Image (spheres, rainbow, N blue to C red):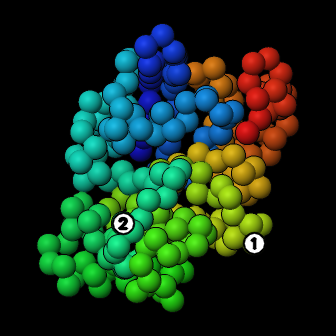
């Protein structure tokens, strides 16, 4: 479904991605892990069109999207969340989903979009907060709203950027179940960035490790956990540090 080939990105003299190549297959839940500064969110920004790569290509369902604007990528079927949740502060939880539903979710009438929004709000477990103003939600609830906003664009591929960060153990467990339901019940492929290893190891079918601008490991979670090179990266051997 998604293929990155020899992707490079630099900011002035700072090389963030030097030779990143990876694939995500239809129906997978894949993890992308690595130390802070490894370029994980930079890669998401390139895939979603917010940044342009300095080299390499990105293809989605066989189509080159390397230089495609974000608005077109959203309509092609790639949705995403952001590390920092930013609900529309004066909109209700339900109405936070309307921009995505009306722009790329396939809806033309606000009334129909609002009906779908309530379905998605229920799907992510926020039905009891459907009419609450977005800024008044708890951190856990804002995370769920962020996921619902991503789903509102009707994606085939959903990019989740650290949705487990800052959550309690019980919230992590519940959110793992939600991510699995997104794949199993909605048929949406998931690629997630995560530092919460409890979540990554339990929800992912496969994990890719990004360090020094490229993928250094790509395997099942149990194999990644035993990979000495990955262990060295997260223990801070060399210049990387665990985050």
Residue 169 x, y percent position in the rendering: 77, 66
Q: CA distance from mark 2 to mark 1?
A: 27 Å
Residue 189 in sight: no
* Mark 2 neighbour class, 10 Å CA radius: few under 14, some 14 to 19, many 20 or more: some
- Report which quarter residue 149 is drawn in: bottom left
Q: SS for tag 2? A: loop
Name of the residue lying farthest toward the bottom? 128
Q: Is residue 3 left or right of residue 227?
A: left
Please name whichever residue, 171 or 91, is drawn nearer the observer in this view of the structure: 91
The residue tagged 1 is: 170
Q: Kindly give the residue lying farthest to the left in the view shown.
A: 108
Residue 243 point in image, percent of width and height: 73, 39
Quarter of image, res 109: bottom left
Q: Is residue 129 left or right of residue 168?
A: left
Residue ranking furthest to the top: 13
- Where in the figure is residue 228, as x and y percent of width and height? 84, 28
Q: Earlier in the sequence, mark 2 or mark 1?
A: 2
Which residue is the site of mark 2?
88
Residue visible at 14% across and 73% down? 108
Q: Residue at x 65, y 39 (%)?
A: 33
Which residue is painted at 35% across and 73% down in the image?
90
Question: Position of 22 compared to 54: left or right?
Answer: right
């Amino acid at each position: 479904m998604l293929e990155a080939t020899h992707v490079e990105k630099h900011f002035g003299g700072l090389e963030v991605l030097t030779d990143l190549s990876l694939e995500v297959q239809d129906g997978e839940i894949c993890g992308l892990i690595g130390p802070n500064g490894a370029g994980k969110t930079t890669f998401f920004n390139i895939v979603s069109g917010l940044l342009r790569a300095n080299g390499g290509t990105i293809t989605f369902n066989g189509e080159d999207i390397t230089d495609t604007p974000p608005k077109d990528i959203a309509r092609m079927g790639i949705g995403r969340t952001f590390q920092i949740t930013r609900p529309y502060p004066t909109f209700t939880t339900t109405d936070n989903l309307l921009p995505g539903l009306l722009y790329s979710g396939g809806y033309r009438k606000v009334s129909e979009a609002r009906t779908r929004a309530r379905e998605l709000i229920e799907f992510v477990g926020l039905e009891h907060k459907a009419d609450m103003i977005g800024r008044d939600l708890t951190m856990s609830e804002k995370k769920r709203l962020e996921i619902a906003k991503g789903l509102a664009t009707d994606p085939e591929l959903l990019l989740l950027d650290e949705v487990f960060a800052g959550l309690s153990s019980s919230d992590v467990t519940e959110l793992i179940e939600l991510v699995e339901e997104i794949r199993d019940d909605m048929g949406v492929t998931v690629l997630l960035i995560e530092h919460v290893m409890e979540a990554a190891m339990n929800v992912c079918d496969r994990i890719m490790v990004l360090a020094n601008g490229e993928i250094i490991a790509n395997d099942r979670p149990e194999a990644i956990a035993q990979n000495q090179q990955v262990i060295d990266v997260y223990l801070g051997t060399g210049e990387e540090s665990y985050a």
